[in-house]
Image (cartoon, rainbow, N blue to C red):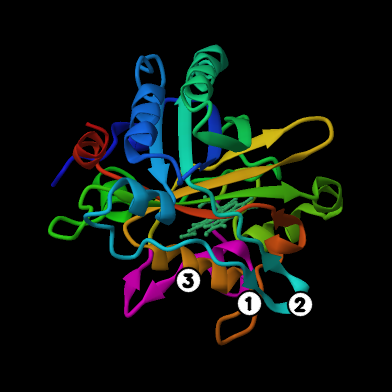
Amino acid sequence: MTKPQPAIFQENSTKFYSLEYSLDLSLPLATLKSAISKSLSNTSSVSIVIAFGKQAWNKLQPDWQPESLIDFEALQGVDGYSIPSTQRDLFFWIHSENHDDNLDCVLKVQQALAGVAKLQLELPGFTYHDSRDLTGFVDGSANPKGGDQQLAALIPAGQPGEGGSYILTQKWLHDLASFNQLPQDQQEKIIGRTKPDSIELEGDAMPADSHVSRTDVKVDGRAMKIYRRSAPYGSATEQGLYFLSFACEIKRFSIQLERMFGTTDDGLHDRLIEYSTPLTSSYWFAPSQQDLDDLLH
Ligand code: HEM
């Protein structure tokens, strides 16, 4: 199997920085490639993943595209809930144990892309206590471990883009004041796990509209596993989660989102969306290291 970008699976980091850019796709290919190459040079003090939206990929690599890459399309859910599309062209996920190293890298990327790309979103994130979301619940408990991470995240050998990965990013804004007012047992029914120790609710105790029930999906008996690397962001005035996940096929994301927003057969929506709102959404393709090197050289 062609090797993935190694930073996808680097799990020691506690500080994160996400950058989303739109690219000036009318510029000559050589200009775009040289700016992107420059943005990735001298970044060894951090882990960095670069990924492309569909239009940017098609411009930069006209010879082939990964089979299921699409632009994110807005989703109108039930009960007035919806997801906007803010599809962009270029995504950088920078992470390490130090905010200062991350910022040095961010400044290099920004400088390298001056004149070819416009910054549309920048968001520093961090590990909150023992890997909790700002709602206070552990985020990542059911994430695949060991070799199952690669199975969930990477396009399998033999397919176009093998060793690459599809990414969904979404900036979610929490209404913490409302969520925190709920008694703990109500919060646990919304998530589908206990709050102190993240034990999954069982049997009748697990509501069909909990977050876990909506996202733990099987299709034809196959678990639609994804590899989540989300991180909280927050300040005095705005708090939430930058949802970031890798998968071997885009369908895994779209099925989970449809179940969260009630557009599947049972029409139930995920109770979590009553307390948090997606403000942005993009699909990306993170090519394997070899395909990235071929693209840029
Ligand atoms: C506000 C946004 C979100 C928050 C705060 C959040 C939080 C959580 C928490 C606390 C858990 C339980 C612990 C764990 O297994 O990680 C969880 C599970 C999970 N979430 Fe989310 N999540 C969010 C959005 C999403 C979205 C948008 C997706 C999919 C597109 C998603 C997919 C999953 C999956 C697949 C699981 C594991 C289900 C299982 O197999 O048990 N989450 N999430």
Residue highlighted by disc 2: 79
188 versus 220 height, above or below: above
Badge 1 local density, few (<14 within 10 Å), some, or many (20+)?
many
Residue 285 magenta: no
Amino acid carrying label 3: it is Ile
223 versus 24 height, above or below: below
Judging depth in this view, the residue of 67 and 207 nearest the camera is: 67
Q: Between disc 3 and disc 1, whose residue precedes?
A: 3
Q: Residue at x 23, y 53 (%)?
A: 161
Query: Residue 137 lies in what quarter of the image?
Result: top right
Q: Looking at the picture, how far across and down is residue 211, in whole percent?
A: 60, 63
Mark 3, secondary structure of its residue? helix
Q: Is residue 285 left or right of residue 112?
A: left
Q: CA distance from mark 1 to mark 2?
A: 8 Å
Mark 2, secondary structure of its residue? helix
Residue highlighted by disc 3: 255
Q: Between disc 2 and disc 3, whose residue precedes?
A: 2
Residue 214 magenta: yes
Residue highlighted by disc 1: 262
Magenta segment: 199-224
